[in-house]
Amino acid sequence: MSDQEWKPKMRPQSTMAQAFSSALDSAFMLDSDVNNLSQTVDQKKQQMMIQNRELEELQNRIREAEQRLQMSQKAGVAPAGSGQQASHGSEHSEQRANH
C-alpha cells in the first residue's frame, strides 16, 4: 500500500482524547475571549477619558457662569428676567394709585 492510497480509519475516539480536544478548543477560545474583553476594556477606558474631559469642561463653564452671576449681583445689576418682572409690577402699582 502506497502513501497515496493510505486513508485513516474512522474509529471512535476515546473519552480521554475527546476531553483533551475539548480542552484545547476551550483554551484557544479563551484566548480569543480574553483579547475581545481586553479590547472592550480599552474602548471603555478611552470613552471614560473623553467623558471625563467633557465633564471637566462643563464644570469649568458652570464655575465661570456662577462667577459672572456673582459679579453682576455685586455690581447691582439685576438678572435679565427679574428686571422685566420688576418693571411690570411697578407699572401695575402706578396704575392702581392713579385710579
Image (cartoon, helix red, strand yellow):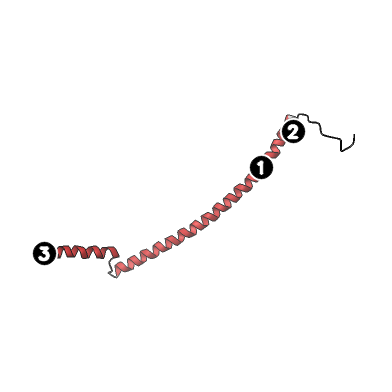
Q: What amino acid type is highlighted by mark number 2? A: Ala
Pointer 3: what residue?
97
On the image, the x and y values in percent for residue 8 come to 81, 34
On the image, the x and y values in percent for residue 19 come to 71, 33
Indicate left or right for 40 with 97 as reference. Answer: right
Please report the residue visible at 31 percent of the width from the left and 68 percent of the height from the top: 72
Q: CA distance from mark 2 to mark 1?
A: 18 Å
Q: What amino acid type is highlighted by mark number 3? A: Ala
Residue 26 sits above or below residue 49 on the image: above
Indicate left or right for 3 with 78 as reference. Answer: right
Residue 86 shows in the view: yes
SS category of the residue bearing label 2 = helix
Q: Earlier in the sequence, mark 3 or mark 1?
A: 1
Pointer 2: what residue?
17
Residue 79 shows in the view: no
Furthest residue toward right: 1
Q: Which mark is residue 1?
A: none
Please report the residue visible at 87 percent of the width from the left and 38 percent of the height from the top: 4
Furthest residue toward front: 5
On the image, the x and y values in percent for residue 55 come to 46, 58
Task: Say if mark 3 contacts mark 1, CB within 8 Å.
Answer: no
User: Dot 2 surroundings within 10 Å: few (below 14), some, or many (20 or more)?
Assistant: few
Pointer 1: what residue?
29
